[in-house]
Image (cartoon, helix red, strand yellow):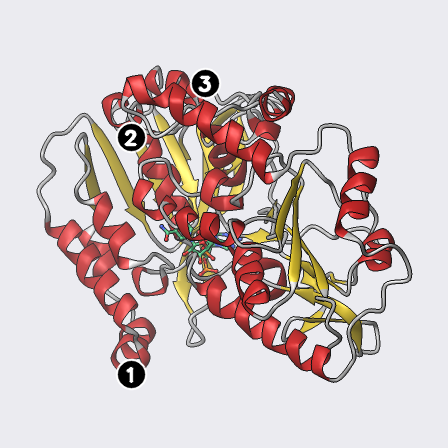
Amino acid sequence: MTDEPKRVAVVGAGPAGFYACEDLLKHGFEVDLFDVLPTPFGLVRAGVAPDHPKLKTVTRRYEKTASEPGFRFFGGVELGSDVMRSELFERYHAVIYAVGTSDDNRLGIAGEDRPGSHSATEFVAWYNGHPDYAEREFDLSVGTAVVIGNGNVAIDVARMLVLDPDEIKVTDTADHAITGLGAASVEHVIMLGRRGPVQAAFTNPELLELGELKRSDVIVDPADMQLDEYSAKWLEEHGDKTARRNVEILTDYSQREPQGKSHRIELRFLRSPMEIVGDDDEGRVSGIRVVKNRLSEELRAVPTGEEEVIECGLVLRSIGYRGRPLPDVPFDERRGLIRNEGGRVTDEEGRPIPGEYAVGWIKRGPSGVIGTNKKDASDTIARLLEDAEAGKLNEPAGETDPDAIEAWLKAEVPGLVTWEGWNKIDRHETTAGEPHGRPRVKVVSVAEMQQIAGG
Ligand code: NAP
């Protein structure tokens, strides 16, 4: 490397983006971190459940990264519209995508788009005050909700539906959702797993939390805990600690006497959704038709043909995410991820493209917890360092001077928000939260954020 520091654009200011910045700064690079929103922290702000404030304290580490010399934040910049990929390559020695996986998987069954059927993505983004989802409406004046999927996101949305309003109002849940959830009449949440308890993707602390809810009993049918032979064998021979403990926790739930709490979360297994039914073709959700499954030797769900209709007024599908392609950036349609080899973005022949990298969920898929992205990012940065050493980064043809780049961005992107601007939004939110004992009152309009940041 020459004496001039190499400059990297990191696109996406969630955990993976911040861990990438941290590593790059440590190795003498300068970074400009971009985000489509005026606010940083990605899913820590817009995904992590508001009643899990401890998980959000990880932002202190990101703030430390942001305070390092050589770091800048540019919020409110959309790659592919405000700024093009080619324009970044004109100005930076490398570009790293850390954009996460923002599209939700679909069930592909009839009735999926009925009023009252939503993705968990929408619901989570709504209660977390993501500006693009603040105006969404959820009819919570129903008695029963069905959550499809057996992952931690399913647990989050099920729990949020039954929390006591007193528990919600001390969190940073968006004000519109505090009102909406406070007025909700959902008393019964059914979580559906297409496979059995052994295959559930929950982590232990999240599953345990379901058994400790103030106003909700947790219900598991003891018959569901009679494991089929293949699951029992798998658990015996290959079961990891998490799966074993999940089975113990669920067995405990199946043996509990309901305590007569006002709400219930019920976990039902080995059922696949076939159709979301309603009163007429376009009508609101009135139920979900499911087929009972058995497990094959390969532990796949196989329909038995036996069906039932579960009556409900709300369906939230929580069956994982996939990446959204970025204009001009190689994309693997099958995997729903940026095409890459260990973080190096590759062309159609599988050759690495100089100076182009991916980290986090858009690199490996939506798995793991926040901390998983630390190792993931440092693996990619290790590849970038090898490439830098070998002289294989991008050679920018344009202006690389940081001040000139900022001037260009200011001219291109009305409402650009810098780290200083974000700090103003942050202070505004936390100050508004203080009198109510809340960590913050989120601003949910981009225009208002820009106004506060500019003021
Ligand atoms: P996930 O853990 O991958 O779970 C997805 C669930 O959807 C699985 O149970 C899967 O079942 C099911 N599914 C997929 N396709 C289906 C279909 N067509 N019909 C019925 N069920 C289907 O995904 P996630 O819950 O979205 O979570 C994403 C990541 O974020 C995970 O790593 C999770 O741990 C993490 N997260 C962590 C926390 C936390 O730490 N508190 C909170 C939220 C999220 P199969 O197994 O049968 O495919």
Badge 1 or badge 3: first in the primary sequence: 3
Badge 1 or badge 2: first in the primary sequence: 2
| Residue 320: percent from left, percent from top | 52, 52
Tag 2's secondary structure? helix
Q: CB at mark 2 closer than 8 A to ligand 1?
A: no
Q: Which residue is mark 3?
A: 176
Q: Is residue 435 above or below residue 27?
A: above
Tag 3's secondary structure? helix
Looking at the rendered structure, the kind of residue marked 3 is His
Q: Which residue is mark 1?
A: 237
Q: Tag count in the figure? A: 3
Please state which of the two labelled residues, at mark 2 or mark 3, is closer to the viewer. 3
Looking at the rendered structure, the kind of residue marked 1 is Glu
Looking at the rendered structure, the kind of residue marked 2 is Val
Q: Is residue 335 above or below residue 166?
A: below
Please state which of the two labelled residues, at mark 1 or mark 2, is closer to the viewer. 2
User: Which quadrant contains ligand 1?
Assistant: bottom left
Q: Residue at x 71, y 28 (%)?
A: 415
- Screen quadrant of the C terminus: top right
- Mark 2–mark 3 Cα distance, whole angstroms, equals 17 Å
- Screen quadrant of the N terminus: bottom right
Q: Quadrant of residue 112?
A: top right
Q: Is any atom of residue 243 visible in this view?
A: yes
- Mark 1–mark 2 Cα distance, whole angstroms, equals 37 Å
Residue 206 horizontal side relative to residue 73, left or right: left
Q: Which residue is mark 2?
A: 162
Tag 1's secondary structure? helix
| Residue 228: percent from left, percent from top | 29, 69
Categorize mark 3 by other alpha carbons within 10 Å: few (<14), some (14-19), many (20+).
some
